[in-house]
Image (cartoon, rainbow, N blue to C red):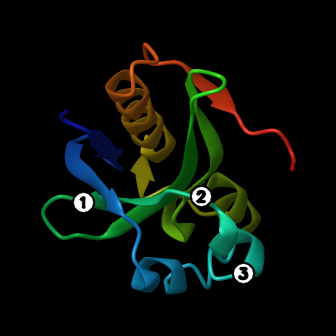
Amino acid sequence: MNLFVLDTVGSKVPVYVSAATPDDLRATARWQTQWTSKVALEMPNKVALRRTDTDELLGLMAYIVDGRSLAVEIVYVESADHSNANLLHAEGRTKKYIGIAKALFAYAVSISIKNGYDGVLVRSEER
């Protein structure tokens, strides 16, 4: 899978997904959600989206492979502070990258296909 995001001039930036590390979670201190909180730490299957060339952390996602629903359940997705529209709007700044969530959702679709669920995704209900 050739995942990418766009930079501010519209150029494709290759990205990849890997398991989120403790350092990734600690790097969220200025994000909308601190992924070191008790609730965030309890989320399953946390993955990180990174630039292929620099390993810059662009976003995080948590998901569940749900055999009962025959789908991948998206628990939470967040862009890094430099590309989070909610945070940037308050500061009057623009995103550094566009398409972080799209890339993470594309990855989730690939997990769904890999598990025989035909790419089906569902959103997480409040627990």
Number of the front mark, 1 or 3 = 3
Residue in the picture at 61% in, 85% down: 29
Residue in the picture at 50% in, 67% down: 82
The foreground one among 33 and 124 is: 124
* Residue 21 falls left or right of residue 16: right
Residue in the picture at 62% in, 36% down: 73
The residue under label 3 is 37
Q: Quadrant of residue 71?
A: top right
Q: Quadrant of residue 33?
A: bottom right
The residues tagged by marks 2 and 1 sit, at their Cα atoms, a distance apart of 16 Å
Which mark, residue 51? 1
Number of the front mark, 2 or 3 = 3
Give the residue furthest to the left.
53
Q: Residues within 10 Å of mark 2 (few under 14, many from 20)?
A: many
Q: Quadrant of residue 47?
A: bottom left
Task: Label 3: state its secondary structure.
Answer: loop
Q: Is residue 125 above or below residue 63?
A: above
Task: Label 1: state its secondary structure.
Answer: strand
